[in-house]
Image: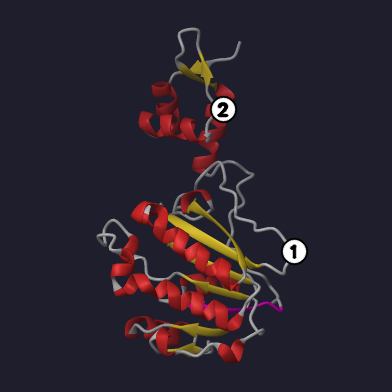
Amino acid sequence: MTKYFTVAEAAKTVGVSSDTIRRWEKVGLIKSYRSDLNYRLFNTEEVSRVKNKISGSDTNNNFKFLKRNNKTDFTTIELFTGAGGTALGLENAGLNHLLNVEFDKDALNTLQINRPKWNVIGKNISEVDFSPWFGKVDVVEGGFPCQAFSYAGKGRGFEETRGTLFFEFARCVKETMPKIAVGENVKGLLRHDGGKTLNIMIRALEEIGYRVSYKVLRSQYLDVPQKRERLIIIAVRKDLNFPILIPKEKDYYISIKE
């Protein structure tokens, strides 16, 4: 006979709080059943599956860094490079950096130490002419500064200078016309000014000649041991006939230990 766990029993067995179990059940990360009295119940198999997933004992969890042995022919321009986290991910995926743009002195020092061969321009992005790379770049990526759209940054949006840097991102896209453009920002951008700010950004990219899609991704469900929600904007040039694919979240998360 199948054994069923209550929310509290499932939480104790898995090693998380009851609220976490309820949250996972709500988003479909753990499957529940309803008793005759409409209580949430979880069978042994489901509780064991989730416990193994988060403990790392599930042999199907072969976590590894994505790093190609060989370079591809795809090229990138990375804006607002910072210390190079996203740029490193693109490099590990086999892409070749044509250009990185970063203005902060400390970030520049970090890049020069860790990646001395990267072509990094240490200028204000508004001073950079991207037209020499027209038709030569496959991907333009940029995490334009998010403070103007975050709750912690008071959400002043385009009223703050940092909020207008999206338009420098869009200018780079217009001057280079890459196959794909990828933007990243905080979740708060989704609802900033009732959604008007994001709509302005989408229209700007559409007017340049791109199809645009976006989604909030949670890093802890994408093999990253970090709780971070980010709005990812992906734009594909309209003359290219391929779908916009956004990563699908996993049904587990991993820890730093793993």
Q: Is residue 164 visible from the viewing direction of this image?
A: yes
Q: Which residues are magenta?
A: 73-80
In the rendered image, the residue lying farthest to the top is 36
Count of labels in the image: 2
* Res. 90 image quadrant: bottom right
User: Which residue, given by chain and number where applicable, does mark 2 sit on?
Assistant: 46
| Residue 126 or residue 150, whichever sits in front | 126
In percent of width and height, residue 198 lies at 44, 59
Image height of 192 relative to 201, above or below? above
Seen in the picture, residue 60 relative to 86 is either above or below; the reply is: above
Rendered image: mark on residue 89? none
* Residue drawn 74% across the image and 63% down it: 241
| Location of residue 221 with respect to 23 vertically, above or below | below
- Left or right placement of residue 242 versus residue 156 in this view: right
In this picture the colour scheme is secondary structure
Q: Which residue is mark 1?
A: 241
Magenta stretch: helix, strand or loop mostly? strand
Query: Could you classify mark 1 by the number of other residues whose Cα lies within 10 Å: few (under 14), some (14-19), or many (20 or more)?
Result: few
Q: Are marks 2 and 1 in contact (CB under 8 Å)?
A: no
Tell me the quarter of the image containing the N terminus: top right
Q: In front here: 101 or 23? A: 101
Write the residue at 39% across / 82% down. Answer: 110
Q: Earlier in the sequence, mark 2 or mark 1?
A: 2
Instruction: State yes or no: residue 96 in magenta.
Output: no
Instruction: Indicate the amino acid at tag 2.
Output: Glu
Question: Percent from the top left, x then y, of residue 136?
Answer: 66, 85
66 is higher (above) or lower (below) than 122: above
